[in-house]
Amino acid sequence: MRIGDFSRPRIGWRRQRAAEAAKGTAAGAGTVQAAGAGTVQAAANRNRGSLQLRHVDAGSCNGCELEIASIFSPTYDAEQFGIRLEASPRHADGLLVTGPVTVNMSGPLRKTFDSVPRPRIVIALGDCARDCGVFKGAYGVEGAVGDVVPVDLEIPGCPPHPAAIVAALRTVAGT
């Protein structure tokens, strides 16, 4: 094998992986679970191609944050679908929450949730946000995101694959 072969991009592999993850069949991608399918559909109809999310780290290990950062890279480019992270909860359409909710973050999460204008959507990203994952039963953990605020969409995985995150967010964005 030549040295130049290692630097050649494998575009076909990435497109196939992204297509499989969008269908929920890629290894480790999991399937998106909507708690209120009507809420997600209503958000998709309302957003029509634009989704502004406020990201809240409620106590995660930062694995999901790395995957969130990668969905805005040129490989996955979530912004082409109108998905953006918003700095202010008052300008956001919903919350993207990662990690189990720690005792110290339960109050700020509730305040952030109350600051997002209605109608709003809450997305629990990762196994820790869904059911506390490996942090279940820890002394500093209050519970999953659904125990503190109502969750509309759950994206499983530890951490979820970036293509699965983009596919789930596209269902909410209506693209």
Image (cartoon, grey):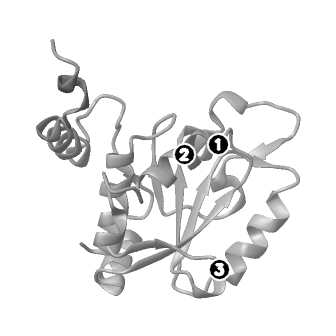
Would residue 145 be found to the left or right of residue 18 on screen?
A: right
Residue carrying label 3: 89
Residue carrying label 1: 62
Find numbered disc 3 in the image and state the secondary structure of the residue it sits on.
helix
Q: Quadrant of the C terminus?
A: bottom left
Residue at the image position 86 percent from the left and 50 percent from the top = 103
Which comes before the other along the chain, label 1 or label 3?
A: 1
Would residue 139 be found to the left or right of residue 46 on screen?
A: right
Separation (CA) of disc 2 from disc 1? 6 Å
Identity of the amino acid at label 1?
Answer: Asn
Find numbered disc 2 in the image and state the secondary structure of the residue it sits on.
helix
Would residue 35 be found to the left or right of residue 12 on screen?
A: right
Which comes before the other along the chain, label 2 or label 3?
A: 2
Identity of the amino acid at label 2?
Answer: Leu
Q: Residues within 10 Å of mark 3 (few under 14, many from 20)?
A: many
Residue at the image position 31 percent from the left and 65 percent from the top = 170
Residue carrying label 2: 66
